[in-house]
Every structure is written in structure tokens, then in C-alpha cells.
Image (cartoon, rainbow, N blue to C red):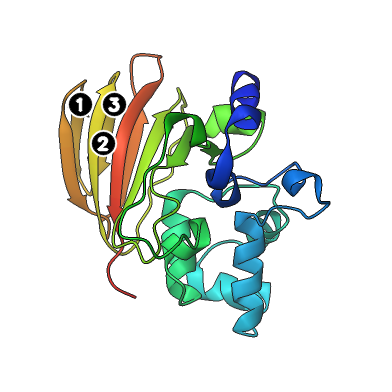
Amino acid sequence: MEKNEGKRQRGSSKAEDFITHPAQADRAGTGLKKESLGDRIKQAREIHSLTIQELSDRTGINADVLKRVEGNKMIPPLGDLVKLGKALETGMSYLISPGTDRPMSVLRTDQRKEASRHLGKRAERYGYFYESLAPEKANRSMEPFMVTLTPSEEVQPSTHDGQEFLFVLQGQMMVQVGGQKEYLGTGDAVYYDSTKPHFVKCVGGRETKILAVLYTGRQ
């Protein structure tokens, strides 16, 4: 992750307002912190007058995990973001970034921001990083991400609303949906229902890069 810090700091313009990892720097030296994913989740929860425990009961996400997420100490996996968006009646897209109401959104390479499922060494252990590829488009029906799978022995199946499309850009991976398991290489693709228990994992001991598009259904 240290190698990417320089890139993050050099990344310019509006995309920095819509990063999905906790913001560390002040906005343009004004002393105002950038709004983070954890901030938006907390604000949405408070708007609905929910306690953390009540949100935990709605989503099935551990209350201690939610506290860490709201405190910007942990980034939730994508499946949990889908559950949070539904429970808070905001949609996953708003939690990642509200975006702006424009007909077209362009994201330049140097504007992309990386988020990790977990921070620090724990991220390497559990394993994946993701970057939103459409953070400035409001009212998104799809959620495109660049995902980097890192070698990890631990896998945690996920179940949530919607469907997913994955395209392998580099490396090899294993995907399991229900009782079906498949191995994919560069150029291979898979489409599945997210309502079935599923997980993906890189194989071969090297990182795997994939394009992932999530459709979470209408709110």
C-alpha cells in the first residue's frame, strides 16, 4: 500500500472528494476534512434514527465492525456496502460517492483512488483492494470497480441482492457460486447472481486484477 500513497497524494481534482477510503488530508488546506465513506454511513444511520446495534440487526454486520467502519478504521467489503445501502435506503452508490447529476462521467487514471477491504497488514491477509470507476456519476444503476485480489488463505462467502459481472484483466482466480467452482484466467469472464453464497480468490500466488460490475437492483 505504501507504493500507492504517493499516487494518491498526486491524484488530482474532484475525484479526491469521492474516495472510498478514509481521507487523511485536509481539503485544499482549509482545515475541513474530506467526507469519507464512514462519515456518510454514520450520517445516513443518524438520519434514520438508528443505533449501531439496530443497523447491525438489519444488515447482519457485526456492531463492532460497524463502529470501526464509521470511525474510518476499516473499509467494508463490497457485499456489506450493498447491505448497508439497502438498510439505510440510500443505495450503495451514494455511500461510495453521491456524485453529480451530469450525463457523462469521465475518470482519468490519475484520479482513481484505491480502497482496501481491511487496512494495513490485515488487508494483505484477507485480501482485496478496490477502486470505484464511476465516483462522479449520480444515481448509478451499476457499480464498476477495479479490483485487485491478493494471495490469501482465508475466504468469506458473501450473499446480497443483485448480480455481478467479473472480467479477468490479469492473473488467475477461482470463483465459487453455491456449489459450482470455476477457475478463470486472463480474458475470462463470469456473471452470477449475488443472492447465492459466493466468493472469489486469486490462485497461483500472484495478484489478480479484475474488472467488476455490480448491479444491486433498484432501491
* Residue 60 appears left or right of 118: left
How far is disc 3 from disc 1 in space, using C-alphas?
Answer: 5 Å
Which numbered marker is on residue 175?
Answer: 2
Q: How many marks?
A: 3
Label 1's element? strand
Badge 2 vs badge 1, beta-carbon distance below 8 Å: yes
How far is disc 2 from disc 1 in space, using C-alphas?
Answer: 8 Å
Label 3's element? strand
Quadrant containing the N terminus is top right
Give whichever of discs 3 and 1 has the lower sequence position: 3
* Residue 90 appears left or right of 183: right
The furthest residue to the top: 205
- Position of residue 215 measured from the top left corner of the image (x, y, whole percent): 27, 58
Badge 3 vs badge 1, beta-carbon distance below 8 Å: yes
- Position of residue 63 measured from the top left corner of the image (x, y, whole percent): 65, 64
Badge 2 vs badge 3, beta-carbon distance below 8 Å: yes
Which numbered marker is on residue 184?
Answer: 1
| Residue 178 visible in this rendered orientation of the protein | yes
Query: Tag 2: residue type?
Result: Val
Q: Which residue is identified by label 3? A: 173
Name the residue: 59% across, 50% down. 17
